Image: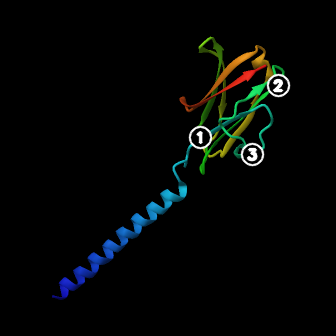
Amino acid sequence: MLNDIRNNKVLKAFLAIIVAVVVILFLVKVYLGPDYGKVKFVISAEEISNPDDIPETDPVTIKDDNRLYFSVTRNKTKIKAENITLAIEVSEGDSFRSYKKISYEVEKKFKKLNGYIPEVYFKNEGKYRIILQMDGNQVVSREFTVD
């Protein structure tokens, strides 16, 4: 009988620990949210001081003598990539063709990468697209226009 009581207490303690772990995991998931780790890639005609101030979907137009600024971050975490490549494509009718590539070697612990692409890359007017690749995997693309 004493063993049954002890086993029952052990079982209840074990179940309480399991429930506590599940609740903690649920709370962590809710806190981090569905956007945890999502890559944020922002481009702008002006220098970017805070990427959170610029919506990712805003249309971007630059003059042919201006730089294109960019920022790469991940929500609530580090970049977690060693090689970041910006593949620039130029519009030809309804499709895009490869134009230039710029690569950056970074450490996985970096929180963000900010920079600019010089104006010499955009001497021709028209539509362009930049594809962000992290460690060789295409992550996101953004289109912009050069006037």
Spot occupied by residue 62 in the image (x, y as percentages of width and height)? 78, 25
Q: In what element is the residue under mark 1? A: strand
How many other residues sit within 10 Å of disc 3, few (<14), some (14-19) or many (≥20)? few
The Cα–Cα distance between marks 3 and 1, rounded to whole angstroms, is 15 Å
Q: In what element is the residue under mark 3? A: loop
Taking the image as shown, residue 23 lies to the left or right of residue 123, namely left
Indicate which disc residue 39 carries. 1
Return the disc, 2 or 1, that comes first in the chain's sequence.
1
Q: Quadrant of residue 9?
A: bottom left
Residue at image point 18% right, 83% down: 4
- Asked if the residues shown at circle 2 and circle 1 are in contact, with their CB atoms under 8 angstroms apart, the answer is no
Return the disc, 3 or 1, that comes first in the chain's sequence.
1
Residue at image point 62% right, 32% down: 84
Taking the image as shown, residue 20 lies to the left or right of residue 76, namely left
Spot occupied by residue 52 in the image (x, y as percentages of width and height)? 70, 46
> In the rendered view, would you say 4 is above or below 24?
below
| Nearer the observer, 103 or 45 | 45
Residue type, label 2? Asn
Residue at image point 48% right, 57% down: 29
Spot occupied by residue 91 in the image (x, y as percentages of width and height)? 65, 15
The Cα–Cα distance between marks 2 and 1, rounded to whole angstroms, is 25 Å
Q: In what element is the residue under mark 2? A: loop
Q: Which residue is mark 2?
A: 66
Taking the image as shown, residue 30 lies to the left or right of residue 6, namely right
Taking the image as shown, residue 17 lies to the left or right of residue 65, namely left
